Amino acid sequence: MNSRYSMGGELCAQCLQPVEASASGDGLRNATLPQVYLSACSTFYCTDCSALLRYQSPDPCECMEQPRPCQIRPLTSFLPTPRLTPVGDLSPSPMEWDHTNDISSKVLTLVSQIRSFPNEKHVMFSSWTSSLDMVEKALGYDPNHIIESVRIDGKVQLKNRSHAIQQLHHNSSISVIMITIACGACGLDLTAASRAHLLEPQWKPSLEGQALARIHRLGQTRPVTTIRYVMEDSFEEHILKVQDRKKLLATTLLSNGSSLEVSNGYASMDGLAKIY
């Protein structure tokens, strides 16, 4: 369950808000507060909703042979830590920094892409702050090749967002900016970058377009490359199909075609149902 949570994208089943865990203040570097709760049928709940469900028992769950309310317990998550360097050896070898077990294959591929183009600046978009955390750790895992980055998410104040953009434009050591797509879809000038990375597909294709328009806009002097990361045989492939249906429906409804062409273009109740 910790592995599933660390991938990001988990929503509270009650309020549909992203579930997050925050670092503890007891001095333990890798411990986090149990602000995420899990039911017996592997359903995530946030702190507020889990407290409410303790007083108001949820409806019987059919995940067991005899339907009954699931028990809800806190899920304690642990942040990955690099392997310790043996005493007397101050220059760890690559084997001692084997992080492949701590980082998802998608993030490893992203970091590999960034390393392959060191002379270009990169923008990474994701829906989840937990994904930004994972990428930030991955960029700094190799002590001999740390990739400097800045980030913008919902917790970053407006003046600090402007500072991060200025760092991207004018600081040669900053090669990556990480942005939650809700913050980066409008109002930012990211023309200092020429490579965009979408860590997961979005339900709204227009949101992706708005985010990419921050890079491919007036003032951009270089070709822009966009890379979308999609896990094979995962729910993300379904999201891509939904995107295609939405684009087809929008194109058909805005066209001047005949009623027959419109009916053949998913502009029907059946087509709308497939989108959702």
Image (tube, rainbow, N blue to C red):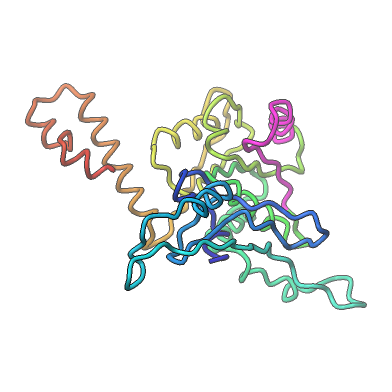
Is 226 situated left or right of 133 in this image?
left
> Horizontal and vertical percent for residue 176?
66, 44
Query: Foreground residue, 193 or 228?
Result: 228
Q: Quadrant of residue 220?
A: top right
Q: Quadrant of the C terminus?
A: top left
> Up-down: is 65 above or below 140?
below
User: How many labels, in total?
Assistant: 0
> Up-down: is 63 above or below 154?
below
* Residue extent of the magenta highlight: 147-169
Q: Quadrant of residue 84?
A: bottom right
**Membership of 275 in magenta stretch:** no
**Membership of 162 in magenta stretch:** yes
> Horizontal and vertical percent for residue 80?
68, 65
> Up-down: is 127 above or below 169?
below
Q: Residue furthest left?
A: 260
> Horizontal and vertical percent for residue 8?
54, 54
For the point 19% across and 40% down, the residue is: 271
For the point 41% across and 62% down, the residue is: 69
